[in-house]
Image (cartoon, grey):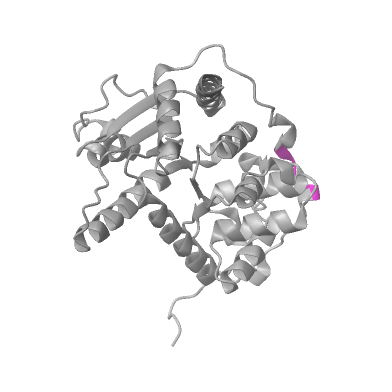
Amino acid sequence: MSSRYRQFDRSNLRVLSLAERKSLLESAIIKAPEPCAEVHPSLEAIADKLISARDKDSARVLMIGAHVIRAGVQRYLFELMEQGLISCIAVNGACAIHDFEFAMHGQTTECVATYISNGQFGLWQETGQLNDIVKNGNKQGLGFGESVGKFLCENNPDHAKVSLFAKAYELGIPVTVHAGIGYDIIHEHPNCDGAAIGEASYRDFLIFAACLEQLEHGVVMNFGSAIMAPEIYLKALAMVRNAAANANSAKTICNFTTLVCDLHDLPENVGSEAPKSDAQYYFRPWKTMLIRTVADGGKSYYVRGFHEQTIPQLWTAATKLLASEKDRVE
């Protein structure tokens, strides 16, 4: 039985090559790490907690929105990953697209205003290859993120060295992609298989939830994700707490640290919810990540700033702490 409603006919679409697209960003924006002169005290605290979490084999979770990929801070993240300070990375579908375009073509980001006017927005042949990569990976039982990382490592395109997905796959760190059908440009393409994307992305959600099973004494960080990060974190945390309680386990998942870095102008004390009459009440990272889920023994931090400022500061703080730790040992 099929739907009684008419569906859009994708055979009418015109999909062009990226060679015909004007991209706004090139991989040259991805710079080598340089120490920051000043570091926010909260990021110094988080760096210390990440090192402690690593030493206890607790989760060190990084959750990001797509603007982190566009900020050119990949190499800072690479070093944090190599230092063992990140054990799982959760992203949305747009992150996968920007990372893939950077890796394959050394450029990303189209001018939406230009291409939406003529209906060409998002319809680029090479980017649509992601649909086939995820479909093939899903057939092998892989998640969305693992499929992309594996493809980039095995095919080693010209700019693979700037890919977060490739670096994570190389290091054995899961990148979980939490896709919303219809959110991403690859869903416009005739080769999009919604069932494969859904299955692969749900597999990633279960991988993410498994990572949170190690969250006691761990750290969860959210850089610039207002919807995806707080929502998947909330559901996964409920699952792992429920499973622990159902197993009559003495294990608790209460003592951990959360960090949110964004541009919202939150009050200095983020430990109290805004009233429902305040628009800030609906900023989910605040009430979900900074208040409700740490209410039973956790601690939370909020840092206002652009990703090109906050992530280098976190890297700077961690690098200094690790260097001093090494000096003490020697």
Q: Is residue 126 visible?
A: no
Q: Is residue 204 above or below residue 38?
A: below
Q: Magenta stretch: residue 38 in it?
A: no
Q: Nearer the viewer, residue 198 or 296?
A: 296
**Quadrant in which the C terminus appears:** top right
Q: Is residue 216 left or right of residue 46?
A: left
**Quadrant in which the N terminus appears:** bottom left
Residue 174 in picture, x, y percent from top left: 53, 52
Residue depicted at x 45% and y 32%: 51
Residue depicted at x 26% and y 35%: 298
Q: Is residue 141 left or right of residue 247?
A: right
Q: Quadrant of residue 139?
A: bottom right
Residue 153 in picture, x, y percent from top left: 71, 54
Residue depicted at x 22% and y 63%: 247
Residue 60 in picture, x, y percent from top left: 44, 41
In the rendered structure, which segment of residues is drawn in magenta?
19-24
Q: Nearer the viewer, residue 20 or 32?
A: 32
Specify the farthest residue to the front.
330
Residue 185 in picture, x, y percent from top left: 59, 54
Q: Quadrant of residue 111?
A: top right
Q: Quadrant of residue 227?
A: top left
Q: Is residue 246 left or right of residue 33?
A: left
The total number of labels drawn is 0
Specify the farthest residue to the bottom.
1
Q: Is residue 325 above or below residue 173?
A: above
Residue depicted at x 40% and y 30%: 49
Q: Is residue 159 above or below residue 271?
A: below
Q: Is residue 123 visible?
A: yes
